Amino acid sequence: MLQFDFSTFPILETERLLLRRIVIADAPQMFALRSNPEIMRYIPREMPKSIEDANAHIEFMQGLLESNECINWGICLKEDGILIGNIGYFRMQPENHRSEIGYMLSTDFHGKGIMQEAIEKIIEYGFKELKLHSIEAVTDPENFASWKLLEKNGFIREGHFKEDCFWQGKYLDSYVYSLLNK
């Protein structure tokens, strides 16, 4: 079984991006991301109502990081280090050498190849450093940009689950994708 140890947080870099630990000082940017209806449209999670809610979310994620249950990077441009999104692994299954990937990005940066850069780096880290055998992704079938990003990066749609998630009074479908470490 794999053993994950995030006691030393891995800072990752790409040509334009710094992928770093999310800290309480990022709460205003996290609030802006998670309270934006356009960004959260396909993410069945409660939106924060205040900076305090964003703080609580960051603290919750830090607890999961400290217990080696997930790892989440803040996506920042190298030039200023300001949080513009996040990407990470959660629902980690060390016994199966598998984890789920999730991500979000400020609408100001959509269509600029930012998430493409970030996902390539995270996939590389997952396979080389975490020694994952497979990476899973779950997306809303209506989130065209997300599933096109996954397919561009070699993920294969393995399933279309009908009404598998109940959120705000209605049942939602999910596409499930997987990428194997070749």
Image (cartoon, rainbow, N blue to C red):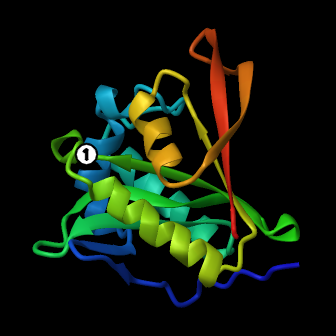
- Residue 151 image offset from top left, x and y in percent: 52, 44
Dot 1: what SS? loop
> Is residue 23 toward the left or the right of residue 151 in the image?
left
Total numbered badges shown on the rendered structure: 1
Residue 177 vs 74, above or below: the answer is: above
Quarter of the image for the N terminus: give it. Answer: bottom right
Residue that lies at the very extreme toward the bottom in this rendered image:
8
The residue under the point 19% across, 65% down is 82
Q: 12 and 81: which one is in front?
A: 12
Q: Residues within 10 Å of mark 1 (few under 14, many from 20)?
A: some
Q: 167 and 11: which one is in front?
A: 11
Quarter of the image for the C terminus: give it. Answer: bottom right
- Residue 57 image offset from top left, x and y in percent: 47, 52
> Is residue 39 toward the left or the right of residue 56 in the image?
left
Q: 152 and 72: which one is in front?
A: 152
Residue that lies at the very extreme toward the left in this rendered image:
79
The amino acid beneath tag 1 is Ser
Find disc 1 in the rendering and name its residue: 106
The residue under the point 40% across, 83% down is 11
The residue under the point 67% across, 74% down is 68
Q: 162 and 151: which one is in front?
A: 151
Residue 55 vs 72, above or below: the answer is: above
Q: Which picture quadrant has residue 146?
A: top left
Residue 78 vs 104, above or below: the answer is: below
> Is residue 53 toward the left or the right of residue 77 in the image?
right
- Residue 122 image offset from top left, x and y in percent: 49, 69
- Residue 90 image offset from top left, x and y in percent: 63, 58
Q: Which picture quadrant has residue 176?
A: top right
